[in-house]
Amino acid sequence: MPKLAIERQFFKELRKLDAPLQDKITETLIKFEAATHTGIHMEKIADARNPLYRSIRIDQFYRGVVLTPEMGEVYTLLTVLPHDDAYMWARRRDLTVNRATGGIEIRDAATIDEALPELTKVAEATSTRLFEGVNDADLTRLGIDETILPLARTITDHAQFDALKPVLPETQWDALAGLASGLTPEQVWSELGAKIVDEPYDTDDLDAAVARSGDRIVLVDGPADLMAIFAHPFALWRIYLHPTQQAVVDTAFRGPARVTGGPGTGKTVVALHRAHRLANQSTGPVLVTTFTSTLTDSLRAGVKLLTNSPEVLDRIDIQHIDKLAHQVFRDKHGAPTMLAEAEEKELWSSIIQRLELPFTEAFLAAEWRNVALAQRVSAASEYLSAKRTGRGRRLGANQKAQVWQAVWEFENSLRDRDQWTHETVCREATRLLAERIDKPYKHIVVDEAQDLSPEQWRLVRAAVPEGADDIFIAGDTHQRIYDSRVSLRDVGIKVIGRSSRLNLNYRTTAEILGWSLQLLHGERIDDMDGQLDSIAGCRSDVHGAPPTTKKFASQNEEVTYVAETVKAWIESGVDPSEIGIATRAKWLGRKVQDALFTRSIPVRMLANSKGSTDSTLVGTMHAMKGLEFRCMAVVGVNAKQVPAAAAVTPADEDQQTHERDMQRERCVLFVACTRAREDLLVTWSEEPSPFLVPLI
């Protein structure tokens, strides 16, 4: 019985078609599954570039182009177009097999043939070539075939290369784009996710190529599966992988492993696929965890896109790290009485007054969290010898003794009151799990790993037995937005030799990404394992308009402009749910919300679970973490709000901590700006943020 596969690009095209035509296409393809291909008028296409192309009738005006198998039963739908356009598509485009990756490729062969003579003429009049530093052997090894190789040799600059993207095979474009961005052939090979083989793939075996092209081809398993996929056409980018990502997902690791990469490179997608793979292969429970509840909602939705198997879903537990700690704690002790933020500050203040200490409440609280808790210090002698890396204020022996006395008093007061903080709940949960032989999980996947504290990492380590594929970590320290620093080695998680990096941004245009990266220019950012991290090589192959930056005389003018811009986006065809607005302070977000509401624009605050999901979302920069929007406005980026004064330690109190706080505030702004896919607006009133000054 014939099976139907669908080329990935078609799902993107489907979203642009009218609803009645989408229904017709769905009906036709269900018939294909329910009956045979003879029942849907499959016809040979005269003069087609590929002799295996056939057409299928959608309705009186539309036709689909299908690749028929040479020997097997899998038919691949490539596109659906008006009758004449479909036949022209088949006559101009060819489908081939990439010798390096073994996957299928579609190219606009006619345009390539037409462009080559003109490009050759231009190249002969130019002294430089874009790929002159790469030899033919390396290009061939990367999958550049005998048709594209002479074309590549004519390309003189980046603009010319970008113009060819619509006509080149996608994988070959990726390889050339990597070389054009400055990567070596070896680095590009690594990005392709393929392995060097003694013999290249058979480029004549299309059936085998279709079977192994999981990154491009969706094999539909019956009408129900087809309908489920059609219900989420816009979300397909989340569930189909580039070969680099697929290689990370499929690798079997002997212990903890990590994937890093800049914003939009698909780390979360890889993490979700990894969790799905582990749950499919194992009978043990898999935990997917992260720092905030907002992100767990997004992760839960992503997992549901990957599978409709109740058994697999039951094996995947998704919850943020604090919830896990509280769950373990409650199972043993019942619900804890939590110390409120104001109560904590009051408690530190009373200790300072009683002991007549020369420290502030903020300094002692940070010392407790970042030194005592982070290093599991439990005695004065341990504190005297503890590393205080990142704690800029130097302390002599007498001062350390004073600090330890304050910490001891604070912990004693918590015990006397039977009160807990999230940190002490996590510490107790870690102790309870460490004592258990039967761990609650067989595998743990951590997303946005850079924001977990050392104690939270110890909780992760204690919740899963050491072994193959025990912990998988996805994160980017350039997107750290909370005051957590950690060395994975120090908390018992060793990833040396099991780390991968993703460089290709799938979300943000090159213009938005390049502008945003300048916010972090010159910053020395750690890699969570004792070294410095680098975002060099992170790139986007999608181009668009540069970000818009705009200054206003007053905040009211700024908010009005933002509201009118949102209205214009919607009138141009952008769905309200594809628009996000980020502010550093909640009160400014509420002011923007009011301005949108008065213009009858559906809007809701991100922290509010109520309201239409078709609304424009307004939230703090922190709350935007892990989300993305077609159009993004980052509002109130002035000197008073970014950096936020309350989030930065004064330089005269602790210079090193001040610098770390400033770096974190830069990262917060960087995260907010890189939520944008196509359009980014950054506004401020009065004086701009010092982070913006070099960019405006």
Image (tube, rainbow, N blue to C red):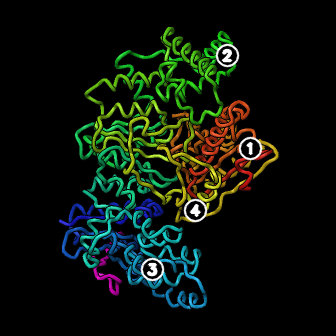
Of labels 1 and 2, earlier in sequence is 2
**In the image, residue 278 lies in the stretch drawn in magenta:** no
Identify the mark at residue 510; answer none if there is no mark.
4
Q: Which residues are magenta?
A: 41-58
Q: What is the spatial separation of the Cα atoms under label 2 and label 3, in whole angstroms?
A: 68 Å
Q: Is residue 152 above or below residue 170?
A: below
What amino acid is at disc 4?
Answer: Ala
**In the image, residue 53 lies in the stretch drawn in magenta:** yes
Classify mark 1: residues with Cα within 10 Å, few (<14), some (14-19) or many (20+). many
Classify mark 3: residues with Cα within 10 Å, few (<14), some (14-19) or many (20+). few
Q: What is the spatial separation of the Cα atoms under label 1 and label 2, in whole angstroms?
A: 36 Å
Q: Which residue is mark 3?
A: 135
Q: Residue 130, percent across and down? A: 54, 78
User: Mark 3 and 4 residues: CB-CB less than 8 Å, in contact?
Assistant: no
Instruction: Give the mark toward the camera: 3 or 1.
Output: 3
What amino acid is at disc 2?
Answer: Leu
Of labels 2 and 4, earlier in sequence is 2
Instruction: Give the mark toward the camera: 2 or 4.
Output: 2
Q: Main secondary structure of the magenta part?
A: loop
